[in-house]
Amino acid sequence: MKYKPKEIALFGTSADPPTNGHQEIIKELSKIFPLVVSYASDNPSKKHKEILTYRSLLLRILIEDFNSPSVLFDQEISSPWAIKSIKRCKQKYNPDKIKFVIGSDLINQMLAWKNFNEIINECDLFIIPREGYPINPLTLKSINNTNAKYEISEFIVPNISSSMIREKNLYKKLPRSLVDVIKNKNLYRNLK
């Protein structure tokens, strides 16, 4: 990295598989932040359909489609633990500020993460509302009680999830660039 970024949007995802929703999030983040860094990770609270190697390949392809120097795929910072990814990002890019991106569908879970207090000491939160997952005022009150700094995005992502795609067998909700790779590598075998 030739310059020190002022602010980074750090977007980790299990990407099992990456969806049009992930693509939309990255597109919108790139309009707001000077640098978006994304990676695929193993979520300790989920059972993944495909191994991390394939999920990271798919996310890398999705990010390469942006063809933008301000949108990076960086699998080296990936960890199942958000705090480790945040610290790796800080060490590698040395930004003035990191905004850790989290969807409204996960914000309640995040409050129970074992490293939550350490996370909010290392970075600010950037909460993205997702259709069908309104942000509970009690959750915001709990976040406020922790003195976490956060921002709620003005954009709302559609209610598309990786599990929804797998359960309903929907290729049409995948970015086009991923469909052939998924078919050729025989991933997510039940998708139509």
Image: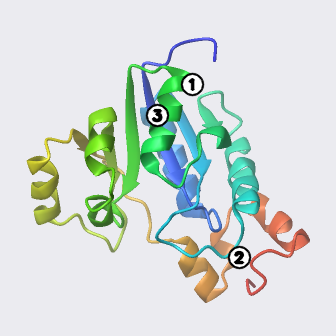
SS type, badge 2:
helix
Closer to the camera, 55 or 121?
Answer: 121
Mark 2: amino acid: Tyr
The 10 Å Cα crowd at callout 1, few under 14, some 14 to 19, many 20 or more, is: few
The residue to which callout 2 is attached is: 171
State the residue lying farthest toward the right: 184
Q: Nearer the viewer, mark 3 or mark 2?
A: 3
Q: Residue beneath label 1, please?
A: 92
Residue shown at 17%/66% (left/top)?
136
Per the image, the residue denoted by label 3 is 87
The x and y percentages for residue 39 are 60, 47
- What's under tag 3, amino acid-wise? Lys
Q: CA distance from mark 3 to mark 2?
A: 35 Å
- Where does residue 46 sit, x and y in percent of width and height? 51, 73
Q: Residues within 10 Å of mark 2 (few under 14, many from 20)?
A: some
Q: Is residue 131 left or right of residue 151?
A: right
Q: Nearer the viewer, residue 6 or 87?
A: 87
Query: Which kind of residue does numbered mark 1 sit on?
Result: Lys
Mark 1 or mark 3: whose residue is earlier in sequence:
3
The picture quadrant where one finds residue 131 is: bottom left
Instruction: Measure the alpha-carbon separation of dots 1 and 3.
Output: 9 Å
Quick check: 122 left or right of 186? left
Quadrant housing residue 158: bottom left
